[in-house]
Image: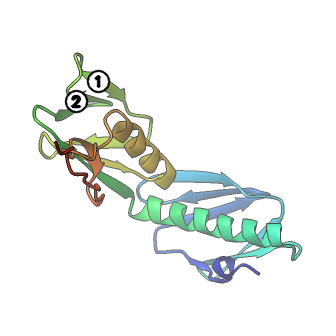
Amino acid sequence: MSRVAKNPVKLPAGVEVKLAGQQLSVKGAKGALELNVHSSVEVTQESGELRFAARNGDQQNRAMAGTTRALVNNMVIGVSQGFERKLQLVGVGYKAQAKGTVLNLALGFSHPVDYELPQGITAETPSQTDILIKGIDKQLVGQVAAEIRDFRPPEPYKGKGVRYADEVVRRKEAKKK
């Protein structure tokens, strides 16, 4: 059995889980998420915990049980606490401004970049050079952060660009004569 799948997912107070066939829905204070559980994974709910097991013991099914456990754990954390990802803009004249569901970015191009945020994601700009992306779906929060970073990834010579707050940019030395 997968070592990840052996650990049960503890359900905090205020989180409700419904299992209907292979459809798992998690509801909490911040919202609700759904997941189609793979047919090779068996999910059981007992005394405030969710347990995962492979229906038969081959390697692929054990791996799928561990993957499902990790996905459900992220759903439980998302609906109870939420996820956030912080981005920093480094460069002269680089600015960000959140207006409703649109994030306006000035990244040194000849035109401003308007990024439409998907449903379930919010963006805050505590300062002009900081972006805070929040949501309940971990995968979607990371995807949105990656798409914003892709507009202007950090370059290795001056370090200018959009970077994650915890990212370390490897710097290169300029060419010598």
**Considering depth in this image, is 4 or 43 the residue closer to the camera?**
4
Q: Amino acid at mark 2?
A: Leu
Q: Nearer the viewer, mark 1 or mark 2?
A: 2
Q: Amino acid at mark 1?
A: Val
Query: Badges 1 and 2: C-beta atoms under 8 Å apart?
Result: yes
Q: Where's the N terminus, which quadrant?
A: bottom right
Circle 1 residue:
113
Q: How many other residues sit within 10 Å of disc 2, few (<14), some (14-19) or many (≥20)?
A: many
Q: Residue at x 44, y 36 (%)?
A: 119
**Considering depth in this image, is 28 or 63 the residue closer to the camera?**
63
Q: Position of residue 147 (x, y in %)?
A: 41, 38
State the residue lying farthest toward the front.
Answer: 177
Q: Report which quarter residue 127 is drawn in.
A: top left
Q: Residue at x 10, y 35 (%)?
A: 92
Task: Give left or right: position of 31 versus 132.
Answer: right
Circle 2 residue:
107
Q: Position of residue 152 (x, y in %)?
A: 31, 35
Q: Identify whether 12 is placed above or below 157.
A: below
Q: Position of residue 169 (x, y in %)?
A: 28, 55
Callout 1: SS:
strand
